[in-house]
Image: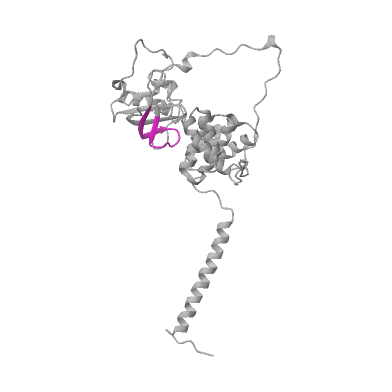
Amino acid sequence: MFTSVPNSKKSRMDGMKRKIALLAGSATLLSLFFSMPQKASAEESVTLIRHSNKAADYYNAGDYGRARDEYRVAIGLSPKSVEYYEGLYNTCMHSQEWDQVAFAIEKIFELDPKKQQSLSYEYGQALFHLNKYEEAVPWLKKALVTADAPTIVFAPKIKQIDIVPSTPYVPPKQPDVVKVAEIPKAPEINPSDYALSFDNAVKAECIVLAEFEGIDKTGDIHWNHPPLANFHITKILKGPPLNKALPVKFEFHDNVNPNAPTGWKFSEKMLPEKGSVWILFIEFAVPKRGMFETFQGSYGRQPSTDENLNKLYLLLDKYNMRNQNS
């Protein structure tokens, strides 16, 4: 039997073995900890999970319209979460809203490029139905490589968290059966609800201040075929967080005056000055065909003057719509 001598080779080896054993034990405990179900991260707020649960409930019940709306809200609250884009594209595959399918899959590719192979068929199918045949062909050919792979059925799950109970699905109430003679007349549309005014524009899902950077000049530009305009968001006054680079459908007319003037022809003189700041009333915080649409066409694009800003802030405060810190 040997006596351990300080600073000897044997004592150093024994110390090293103890350290390795300690690290191995710690690693084992950590692996067990991370394999256990974790609570939701700070980013997944209570509101976000409630909308996620509602979307799953509606999807599982076949109510794809309401499921789509809930996934849109969830995306606005957590724009870098792949699972909500997966929910949106699967939902809109059922309702055949191909522009939404293409949008969601493109975001998935951006966040997780490894999914390009597994979603190549769905993306090619969406492009085909959007009449983008040349773009669809390579994706559909790419899908042939995994054509024999089993199809994974999308089944969203409810997130069971104590403070966020599952929201049960409540189907819309079915109207009572009435005799034809008893069917009431449809309510008259109040024109004031669609009038060109800030009172109506402020109801848009998102309102931002943004600088005009220019337009995409590819393709023909006509009165009813406006170009894509590039804006840069400087401030979000209402609505979910959006990417600073904002593609907007640059309408030349509002919906009240849809007819083109005689002899109208596009000229770059019709465009704003580059760097000028505008108030954009964005109807929905989800783009259509790669562009966000503004309230009542061109009316939803207002110059950022002191008069317009004072009027806007008054209405946002009146209806308690303004984002915190905006």
In the rendering, at what x and y percent does residue 205 appear? 46, 29
70 falls in the magenta region: no
In the rendering, at what x and y percent does residue 264 appear? 34, 14
Q: In which image quadrant can residue 68 be found?
A: top right
User: Which residue appears at 55% of the width and 34% of the height?
Assistant: 70
Q: Is residue 84 visible?
A: no
In the rendering, at what x and y percent does residue 194 appear? 47, 17
In the rendering, at what x and y percent does residue 316 appear? 42, 28
Outermost residue, bottom side: 1
Closer to the camera in the image, 317 or 137: 137
Query: Is residue 160 placed above or below 311 in the rendered structure?
Result: below
232 falls in the magenta region: yes
- The colour scheme used here is one colour
Q: Is residue 298 visible?
A: yes
- State which region is magenta: 228-247
Query: Is residue 192 placed above or below 88 in the rendered structure?
Result: above
Closer to the camera in the image, 123 or 313: 123
Question: What's the magenta bit mostly, secondary-structure-wise?
Answer: strand
For the C terminus, give its image quadrant: top left
User: Which residue appears at 56% of the width and 64% of the height?
Assistant: 29
Closer to the camera in the image, 236 or 23: 23
Closer to the camera in the image, 291 or 218: 218
Q: In which image quadrant can residue 282 be found?
A: top left
User: Which residue appears at 37% of the width and 24% of the height?
Assistant: 301
Image-based side of 252 in relation to 178, left or right? left
Image-based side of 140 in relation to 295, left or right? right
Query: Is residue 24 placed above or below 208 in the rendered structure?
Result: below
Q: How many marks?
A: 0
For the N terminus, give its image quadrant: bottom right
Query: Is residue 74 placed above or below 273 in the rendered structure?
Result: below
